[in-house]
């Protein structure tokens, strides 16, 4: 195993940032509620950011970027300007690339995002967001999700079509990120250095109890050195409805259509998600059926489901919480054919192991998550997965829905075990450090199946600094 100077900086750089950042971004406030509002102002997609806390007469703090929010020009134009900087030091042992490859690498990812939001009266809005994503010091070729130099992440306009008592109806046209539900089907994929975006249009209604979006888009393909463009051979459209307004449960219903002319399939996905809580108990269930036409013109039939049960212990020291999940996604009975469930455009990183070894196809995994807070600003998480194939007539698949080792039938369904460990430290309301370590114990599939790229275990170390402004 190589030990490079970059490895030592994994530990030195966070210490320096932890010392310097409270001075740069503002000390903790006497008003804890104001500090929490400032921390929550930046959302997973920046066009949903909320800076209403600046109008609170009790707010007397200062945080980096506050002076560029809710700026007024004339009586009807309000502008927000801000962004994010993120740097992540990565050390991958035996899994650089896709899956267990036997390749190791150390490298630095850094990303800058800048946005401008302009609201023109109550009926018009324009939003633009720039991204620059780069990778340095690697030996192996960069992945497509790691490099995208100076490009447009969002560029759209909104117009309000209706503003009656039933709730406003808006239309959106342009390049836009999308995030729905728990992000198991549609996500901007924030773990990726480049993030994911689409081009097209959307009509959305925000009622008192329901919100409904209808959209027609084309995925945008990141180009490391040229301006990104949409893939006009692929269409992604759908309807997503969310039941809101109830403090104890949430409901998502969706119908999605993915027409991939590059490969030659068309999949319709119909399903829903329910989550609820009762006292300290929480639960979640999400499922979908998928039908349509495969790339060989055969009928497609697939699906997935996830069930989870959690419990919080607020009266115990460190306030631990425990979740138990079971994830299932169908494969195919024709080994090597891409007829299993297609996970569309998800945040795969969050739900099937932080090492991103497997996609949601031909997979089953019981998994357990434990989290706790030893201090108010420190969050610790453990997550354990046991991966095995849904059926041995098919291979495992990557997060890109490509088959691993398709020429050889699996000798065992047992893929292995993964343990993820993270510590998140809130330096200031808009600045954080993330330390992570993951280990994959290769199972009998890798020991017994011929043709696999690597038969040993794999490790993953990373340290990430993030600042919103």
Image: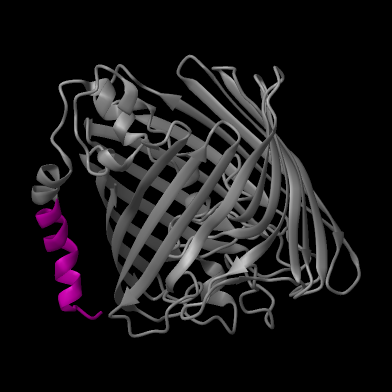
Image check: 103 left or right of 306?
left
Q: Where is residue 457 shown, x and y percent of the image?
A: 40, 70
Q: As displayed, is residue 37 above or below residue 360?
A: above
Q: Is residue 229 magenta?
A: no
Q: Which of the 4 image quadrants contains residue 313?
A: top left
Q: Where is residue 362 shown, x and y percent of the image?
A: 68, 60
Outermost front residue = 74
Outermost right residue = 298
Task: Tell me if I can see residue 397 in this picture.
Answer: no
Q: Where is residue 14 shown, x and y percent of the image?
A: 16, 56
Q: Quadrant of the N terminus?
A: bottom left
Range covered by the magenta-colored residues: 1-17
Image check: 185 left or right of 105?
right
Outermost top residue = 279
Q: Where is residue 333 shown, x and y percent of the image?
A: 81, 65
Type of secondary structure dominating the magenta stretch:
helix
């Amino acid at each position: 195993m190589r030990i490079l100077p970059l490895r030592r900086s994994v530990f030195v750089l966070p210490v320096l940032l932890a010392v310097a950042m409270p001075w740069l971004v503002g000390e903790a406030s006497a008003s804890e509620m104001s500090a929490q509002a400032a921390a929550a102002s930046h959302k997973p997609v920046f066009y949903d950011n909320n800076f209403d806390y600046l109008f609170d007469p009790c707010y007397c703090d200062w945080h980096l970027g506050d002076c560029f929010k809710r700026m007024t020009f004339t009586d009807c134009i309000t502008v927000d300007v801000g962004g994010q900087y993120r740097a992540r030091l990565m050390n991958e042992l035996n899994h650089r690339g896709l899956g267990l490859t036997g390749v190791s690498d150390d490298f630095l990812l850094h990303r800058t995002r800048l946005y401008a939001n302009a609201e023109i009266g109550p009926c018009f809005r324009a939003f633009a967001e720039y991204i620059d994503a780069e990778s340095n010091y690697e030996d192996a070729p960069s992945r497509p999700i790691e490099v995208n130099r100076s490009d447009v992440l969002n560029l759209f306009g909104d117009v309000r079509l209706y503003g009656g008592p039933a709730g406003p109806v808006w239309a959106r046209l342009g390049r836009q990120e999308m995030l729905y539900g728990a992000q198991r089907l549609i996500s901007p994929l924030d773990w990726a250095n480049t993030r994911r975006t689409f081009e097209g249009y959307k009509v959305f209604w925000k009622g008192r109890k329901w919100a409904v979006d209808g959209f027609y888009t084309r995925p945008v393909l990141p180009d490391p050195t040229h301006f990104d463009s949409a893939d006009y051979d692929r269409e992604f459209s759908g309807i997503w409805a969310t039941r809101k307004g109830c403090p104890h449960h949430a409901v998502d219903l969706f119908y999605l259509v993915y027409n991939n002319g590059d490969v030659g399939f068309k999949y319709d996905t119909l399903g829903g998600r329910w989550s609820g809580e009762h006292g300290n108990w929480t639960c979640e269930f999400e499922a979908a059926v998928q039908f349509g036409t495969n790339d060989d013109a055969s009928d497609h039939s697939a699906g997935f489901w996830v069930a989870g049960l959690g419990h919080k212990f607020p009266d115990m020291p460190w306030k631990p919480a425990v979740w138990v999940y079971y994830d299932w996604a169908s494969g195919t009975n024709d080994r090597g054919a891409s007829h299993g469930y297609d996970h569309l455009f998800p945040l795969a990183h969050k739900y099937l192991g932080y090492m991103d070894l497997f996609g949601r196809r031909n997979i089953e995994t019981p998994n357990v998550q434990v989290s706790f807070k030893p201090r108010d600003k420190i969050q610790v998480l453990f997550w354990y997965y046991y991966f095995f194939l849904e059926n041995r007539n098919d291979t495992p698949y990557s997060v890109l829905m490509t088959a691993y080792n398709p020429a050889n039938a699996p000798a065992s369904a047992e893929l292995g075990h993964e343990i993820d460990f993270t510590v998140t430290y809130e330096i200031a309301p808009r600045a954080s450090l993330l330390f992570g370590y993951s280990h994959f114990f290769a199972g009998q599939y890798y020991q017994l199946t011929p043709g696999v790229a690597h038969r040993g275990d794999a490790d993953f170390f990373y340290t990430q600094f993030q600042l919103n402004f």
